[in-house]
Each structure stands twice: as C-alpha cells, then as structure tokens.
Image (spheres, helix red, strand yellow):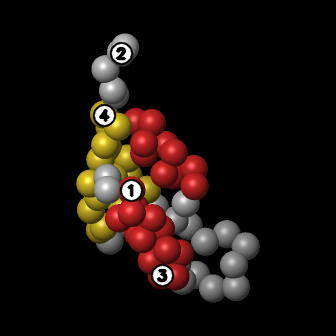
Amino acid sequence: MSPKLFCLADVCMVPIGTSTASVSDFVASVEIKIRESELKSTLHSAGTTIEGPWDDIMNLIGIS
C-alpha cells in the first residue's frame, strides 16, 4: 500500500451566472461541508485553505 499524499488546497468562489456578486450563502454551505469532513481548514479573505489527504480533499471539492 502506498502512503497517502497530503496537500494544501486553496479554494475560492467566483460567482458566474448569478443575479448577485455575493457568495456568502455559497461559502456558508461549503464551510458546513468542510467542517463535517473533519479536514483541517482556515477561512480567510480570499477563500479557504484545506489541509489533508489528496483524495479526501478532491472528494470534498467534488461534492461541494
């Protein structure tokens, strides 16, 4: 079995095709999913940094 690959992923949202430039509702729902995943994360002014195994982060980003 190969070791897990750990990484940092910096994720930001850009509204496309929405009626407003606000992303606060989207950020709130994604933050809930990140907390439920138990991955380490830091919310900052330009997005969210997520730390953990590559596969776990990619699965989380894919479902958010």
Q: What is the distance, in whole Å, between disc 4 and disc 1 at their CAs?
A: 15 Å
Q: Position of residue 61 (x, y in %)?
A: 51, 52
Are the residues at dot 3 and dot 4 in contact (C-beta closer than 8 Å)?
A: no
Q: What is the distance, in whole Å, between disc 2 and disc 1 at their CAs?
A: 23 Å
In the rendered structure, which amino acid carries the disc numbered 2? Ser
In this rendering, the answer to whether 23 lies above or below 11 is below
Quadrant in the picture for residue 64: bottom right
Q: What is the distance, in whole Å, between disc 1 and disc 3 at their CAs?
A: 20 Å
Q: Nearer the viewer, residue 21 or 5?
A: 5
**Residue where numbered disc 4 is placed:** 6
- First in residue order: circle 3 vs circle 4: 4
Q: Nearer the viewer, mark 3 or mark 2?
A: 2
Is 9 situated left or right of 16 in this image?
left
Q: Position of residue 39 (x, y in %)?
A: 31, 52
Q: What is the distance, in whole Å, between disc 4 and disc 2 at their CAs?
A: 12 Å
Query: Is residue 49 among what the camera can see?
Result: no
In the rendered structure, which amino acid carries the disc numbered 4? Phe
Are the residues at dot 2 and dot 1 in contact (C-beta closer than 8 Å)?
A: no
Is 62 situated left or right of 45 in this image?
right
**Residue where numbered disc 1 is placed:** 37
Q: Residue at x 29, y 47 (%)?
A: 51
Q: Nearer the viewer, mark 4 or mark 1?
A: 1
Q: Nearer the viewer, residue 3 or 51?
A: 3
**Residue where numbered disc 3 is placed:** 24
Q: Nearer the viewer, mark 1 or mark 3?
A: 1
In the rendered structure, which amino acid carries the disc numbered 3? Ser
